[in-house]
Image (cartoon, coloured by chain):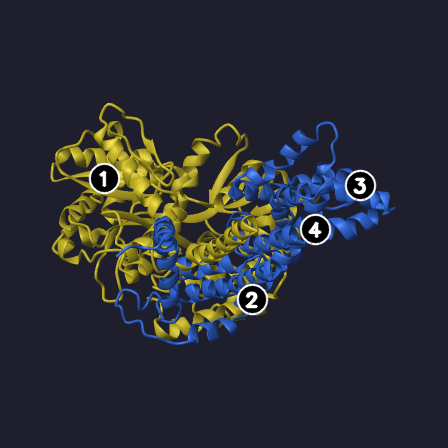
Amino acid sequence: MIKRKMVKLTASMAVTALVMASLAGCGNAGGTKSSDNAGAEVAAEEGTDAAVETSDAPAAETTEDGTASSTEDIGQPNGGAEVRLWHYFEHEAAALNAVCKQYNELQSNIYIIPTFISREELMKQYTIGAVSGELPDIGMVDSPDMASYISLGVFEDITQYLEGWEDLGQFYEGPLSSCKDSEGNLYGLPNNSNCLAILCNMDMLKAAGFENPPATWAEFREVCEATSDPDNGVYGFAMCCISNEEGTFQFIPWLYGSGATVATVDSPEGVSSFAMLSELVNNGWMSKEVVNWGQGDAINAWVAGKAAMLESGTWQIANLDGEFKDAVTWEYQYAEFPASDNGTQATVIGGENFGVCAGSEYTAECAEFLKFMQTAENNAEWCEVAGKLPVRADAVGLKDFWTADARYKVFNDSMEFSVARGPHESWPTISEALYKAEQAAILGEKTPEEAAAGAAETIKPILEKVPLPE
Amino acid sequence: MKLSMAAKKRREGYSFILPGFVYMMIVLGYPLIYNVILAFRDVNIKTFKAGTDVFVGLNNFITLLHDETFLLVFKNTFVFTIGCLVFQFTIGFIFAMFFSKKFTLAGPIRGMVLVGYMMPMSVTAMLGKNIFDVSSGLINDLLMKIGVISAPVEWLLNGNTAMASVIAVNCWVGIPFNMLLLTSGLTGISQDVYESAEVDGANSFQRFFYITLPLMKSAIASVLMLGFIYTFKAFDLQFVMTSGGPLNATDVLGTYSYTLSFTQYEFSMGSATAMILFCCLFIIGLFYLRMISKEDD
């Protein structure tokens, strides 16, 4: 009898705990820091501290959620206050560490400790940090997300520290605007820019009778048709249409290239952009699997010879020179996005910003570091090492790789017709409407007209309240 | 004042419970209460920083019930849970019966079946993603080689097949879990009962339906109930394997709540979704507790 009661009690407790845990696990997402996340944050912090305090252990400390840089990478402690910088630069981490090291050795007010955290995790930590206050001193963010984080209070208004800085006039308006709120206050500085272009396997194009990459949508269709062999898993084109911001990023050039904008997504031009992508899939010129592909998966397909053309970003040049160097045995060429049937040409601006996080005790010092990191020389230097495009006009003339290297030149020239995403505090919702519509059209769940109308249904009420900047 | 023996014992008992109670209140109670508060307010990206969120009563729940995506997600959660329960329970039961027989290598093989259960769900989900890949997945390759299909099936690109794939992967984990619990139930049944039934002329069919099933009733109820709770609150499998796609076809309440809170910054809507998830499980939990207390009486 006692045994039975014990079983009953244990079962009751197990069920209660399980049910409660289900809510504790999900529900506190926006409200408070879950125990798991708290642990992750502590782990990340501990990792950081350990790397600094243990000067005889220079190896980078990897924790569950972050990899703090070693003292070898960022210089010995300079006696200044420790300032935490969170970023998601993986391949570019060494270049970022070098900038931090330079600054740590230059002054002794603050000691910058960069920590790598995966992008998804970093975004989550910012959201949780907005509630709990557990934020780093300096945070990196994908430029279209900045407006949302400014609204959430993740970043500190640093306008006062940047006022009077004559260099500010040198920044391109597009990237700089992504660091501002609706009143024009600055919360950070843009770090780099990138955009998208078409990467062509010229061996495949030439074998199909094309000497040059396509310049128009009509030519693009012809090349796709001639180079596709779906029975053998070879397609004319590969891109990323995954259900996240990356999917929207890769869709924008088609949307704006059609002559539409986010605000006019359901116009006949907007519908034609959805129709273009569904045509690619329906004709067997692009794999339907693109809806599950991130940008990394798409380039993997191109490198494996499964696609003749790829929608590729500036940062991928570094991959082609590095990890894919041996695998890419064919001649390749970057080309600007083709112009649509009405002659419009467009691409999309990507890039990262750095901001000073709310609650930092060293806001002024951190703002100084941002200014240092973004001087013309440092911006040019950093972009060269990391394979990015500069965010200020006077940095362009300091190096020649973005004009001398034909690949970078394509991206540099494309910046003239590239469009920014947002900035808009509701960009995540707008973005979701776009990638869901894109996926619906590609998977044949909706006609291009229905997909465009579905996106507009979500987007238009948002933009009626707060329009996108001109 | 001298305490009676019983009161002393009771006080001692409370002191043992106290640490666990405090732990539960901090780790589970606080987020739970905070979640309830959030679900009845309008905390989102616009009101968050300014602190201008107000009490909105049931508005968030009403909005959710008019949201097509939520209704799909709600349906998905039940389809996923029931689909998983049916397969993992049936196969788990067969496995439990099979491995309760004494034959060579029964132990090691049973141990191997448990590998699926021991793997972290995120790893299982990654494996599932690769196995069900259209062009390079193992399943398509295998099915084409043995001639079951002539062209690759777009497992994760079609809503129905994507749900079936996710259920299949979850069953890989659920079957050993069911098997494990049911095996312990089976070993509790005395062999004498079977032997006397056999003497009375009961065939194996009768032995199963008139001895095994009735005596396993409580174990079966526990397995189904715990399985329901575990499966209903699924998150990591869908998050890693399909991201809830294609087009929310595999999204469940857990992942949708996360998306609302962390991607859309609709914190109150995310909390309301989690509340609905909680209420469903709470009802099931109550049902289960009532059932076992009835049994006890």
Tell me the residue that label 1 is attached to: A378
Alpha carbon distance from label 1 to label 4: 76 Å
Q: SS class of the residue under badge 2?
A: helix
The shade of chain B is blue
Whether residues under marks 1 and 2 lie with C-beta atoms below 8 angstroms apart, the answer is: no
Please report, as a chain letter, where disc 2 is located. Answer: A
Please tell me whether mark 4 or mark 2 is closer to you in this view: 4
Please tell me whether mark 1 or mark 4 is closer to you in this view: 4
Query: Crowding near pointer 4: few (<14 within 10 Å), some, many (20+)?
Result: some
- The residue lying at 39 percent from left, 61 percent from top is B32
Tell me the residue that label 2 is attached to: A451
Please report, as a chain letter, where disc 3 is located. Answer: B
- Tell me the quarter of the picture where residue A131 sits: bottom left
Q: Give the mark nearest the N terminus, 1 or 2.
A: 1
Left or right of residue B270: residue B294: right
Tell me the residue that label 3 is attached to: B195
Q: Which mark, by number, is residue B215?
A: 4
Q: SS class of the residue under badge 3?
A: helix
Question: In the depicted view, which residue is nearer to us: B172 or A84?
Answer: B172
Alpha carbon distance from label 1 to label 3: 85 Å
Going by the numbered disc 3, the residue's amino acid type is Glu
Return the x and y of residue A91 as percentages of the image width and height: 38, 36
Q: SS class of the residue under badge 4?
A: helix
The yellow-coloured chain is labelled A
Alpha carbon distance from label 1 to label 2: 44 Å
- The residue lying at 67 percent from left, 39 percent from top is B138
Going by the numbered disc 1, the residue's amino acid type is Asn
Please report, as a chain letter, where disc 4 is located. Answer: B
Return the x and y of residue B11 as percentages of the image width and height: 34, 53
Going by the numbered disc 4, the residue's amino acid type is Leu
Please tell me whether mark 3 or mark 4 is closer to you in this view: 3
